[in-house]
Image (cartoon, coloured by chain):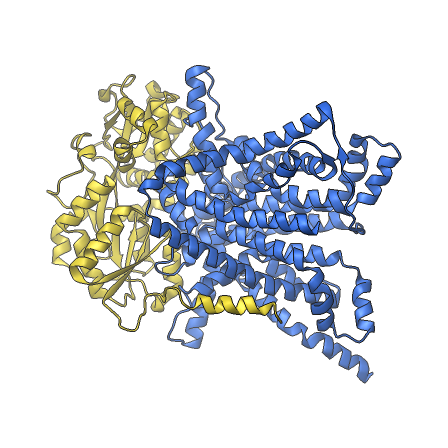
Chain colours: A yellow, B blue
Amino acid sequence: MRYMVPFMLLIAACQSPEKGPETRYAPREVNVYSHRHYDVDKQLFALFTERTGIVVNVVQAGDDELLARLEAEGAKSPCDVMITADAGRLGLARSRGLLQATQSNVLAAAIPAHLRDPEGYWFGLTMRARVVAYDKTKVKPEEIADYADLTKPRFKGKVLVRSAENVYNQSLLAAMIAHEGADAATAWAKGIVTNMARDPQGGDTDQLLAVAEGLGEVAIANSYYVGKLMASTEPEKQKARERLGVLFPVMSTHGTHVNVSGGGVARYAPHPAEAMALLEFLAGEEAQRLFSEGNKEYPVRPGVPVASELQAFGPFTADTLNLEALARLNAEAVKVFDAAGWR
Amino acid sequence: MTGSVRTWWHRNSALWPVALLALLFALPLAVVLTAPLHTPSTQWDHIAQVFLPGHLASTLALLAAVLLPALVLAVPSAWLIARFDFPLRGFLRWALVLPLALPTYISAYTYAGLLGPTGSISVWLATHWNIRPDIMHLPGLGWVLAFVLFPYVYLPTRVAFATGMSHVLDAARTLGASPVRRFMRIALPLARPAIVGGAVLVAMETLNDYGAVKYFGVRTLTTAIFRSWGGLYDPGGALRLSLVIIGLVALLLYMERRSRRGLTTTAQVRGSRERLRGGRAWMATGWCLLVFMLGVALPLGKILGDAWTTLPEADHTRLWAAARNTLLLAVLSASVVLLVALGFVFRQRVTRRTGALVRAAALGYAMPGAVIAIGVMALAAALDNWSGARFSLIGGIWLMVYALAVRFLSVGWRPLQAGIRQQSASLDEAARMLGASPWRTFTRVNLPLLRPTLLAAATLVAIDVVKELPLTLILRPFRLETLGTLTYELAGIEQLREAALPAALIVLCGLLPVLLLEWLGERHG
């Protein structure tokens, strides 16, 4: 069976690569499942290892895939820390019994109460606001104070926004349902659909570029995509930023909708102490500053300087709705989008 | 009497391992098929009433929007290349296969970056000519996917035109039938199985795509799966929707089998090509060149251009490690697929039929990668718990290879099946009459004849593994990065220019086997 020879060789060759988390000498380590895929996270993990000697192993994939993996692995899961880019998924992880309650005075002091789980199941680490970017040549910032202003006849055919599949659209609507009820949220979503400049397509950056190209006048987008656009060195994006202004709409008497990227300790974490150390490190002043500078996100920790691109947008008042509501109302938000015909 | 029992045993003792293998590969499918029994759906009413009709309708519309242009691109090109000589033919012959190396999601980002509403070509046209093309809608996506997927039709159809029917076509030509008449009356009907087989692959790839449809804002059954899973928090609903996709694919496969009925390819004679001259020659070159420019040169130029500009800032060690991992995974998965597929083909050859289990095992291609990954993970977890093993299967490279093999089994199995069908049964009969066992007949007669097909099948699987994304994302072990996951990381945060470099490497990794495949094809006819 000479056909088998190359195959056998391959099997032999395959034994050598990475052995996975278990190694013989077992240095202290922490296993992270993360939906975040940013360079700044890698820098922070490296810094954490440098400071503590704890090695960070990461698997990156989508939120839902990681949750499914955690669930399938059950009690044998190697995961210590689950990090997502959406509070809704953290709440879902909690309700599925995938996280454990933790006690940390450090985290309680560093993170405002509405940005973490009341019982310590998960903690927000960075904050993103759902903002409106507008064409400075056509729109006066006074015209939009509330998300509801986008549904006025003035903006018919002028609103750019991505598809309802996007989790930040879902969390915006979930927050609206929490504050104003499903009927008001449905009316708002219908109003936006009426005012859309085109059927939803592309990502947040595409909406911003479209405003700059005059294909609409206002775009609903995530603050950190706007920040990244402002920091970009690509010529088209530099051209776009001359024309774009940013404002923070509020939700009637509440502030601007924010969502967090955050983490929690897995229920069956083999290294819970290391997991807490990592979370506390990420909520520390230094990490918070790097998150903001490197990835144009708002720090959750008060008093930490914000990246200059974000400072240029001006200050804003964030909604203080406890983000636990986002998980509870996400499915309802999806249904409201369907009812409104928002693709 | 004892003789026939012994024959039966002799036949079937070798077949049990194959059946077990088929069972192993059908298991993830079983997880999905039995979903209604083990995973309740909390939002099924909403999914069935609101999601399903709209998503199903636009899935069917997208299938039509992809298949029609794919056939328009593939069949005439295949006909021209197979039967005629014209300037640049030698180059175009293999160049038209190159889109196979482009993953659909990368090609979607690339075309949108050129011809979307804010794409560079669109913006240029808008400033200079005041027209603004926009391809970001369902028909536009149809063309984009058709340009990447048409080689699935082009390749088998070209082979069919070039070899399977030469004697008939040559006869018609001697009798004075015009090229058009030869094409319409002889070539097309005879190449139908090849065309339909390729079209089924195109349809399956379309059903499986997630990145491109999501970016273009087109709703399909696959986006419905992710929507009910991630948006409605209802994995049970997602599994039931996978069931709908599998049903659709089963229907496609059934249609493909029916279209093959009553047709057998016979002679493997390479026909002579007719030399085109003058205007007709240039028209042939022009058509194929147009397909090449739009389908290969344009997207590849953009990707390579972006990759070049980001090259100085890139992390080269990371890139090379990812490239190495990608190739390793591709080779391993292709080897596993080939071994299993050979077992299936052997069983088929001996029993003269395709078992239901084998057919079920090959349905993995119909399932979205993410669903297979979840199915495989559930199996591994169950096995872990049942065996009480201290080590977890999950997170190992072999589990990932298994899942990839499940996913791409039919990509490797189909060409082998087609290849062995072309071997006359009298070959086997002669060997058996001379006293060779079925196994010996298979390894000494069938297998050597199958060698070129074997390499082609391995290549197709390897390309698919290099391009695969969702399954790899979910199942990869700690610290294992592939080019696909690297591209996804960057594209996921809308850093499309930076994503071009790993994307370019994916394309290059894909190009190597594609070129190898073409070179082999040239050598073996």
Relative to A109, does residue B215 appear above or below in the rendering? Answer: above
For the question of whether residue B495 can be seen, the reply is no
Q: Indicate the quadrant where residue A184 lies.
A: top left
x then y, percent, for residue B10: 73, 78
Q: Which residue is drawn at 53% across and 46% down?
A: B511
Residue at the limit of the structure toward the right, as seen here: B175
- Rendered view: B139 above or below B193: above
Tell me the residue at 20%/60% (across/down).
A276
Q: Which of A215 and B151 is in front in this view?
A: B151
Q: Quadrant of residue B118?
A: top left
Residue extending furthest bottom? B2
Q: Which of B133 and A195 lies nearest the eye of the viewer?
A: B133
Percent coordinates x, y for residue A152 in the rendering: 32, 22
Q: Locate residue A147, reporting x and y percent.
A: 28, 30
The residue depicted at 48 percent of the width and 60 percent of the height is B375
A209 horizontally vs B326: left or right? left
Observer-nearest of A110 and B486: B486
Among the 4 quarters of the image, the one containing residue A162: top left
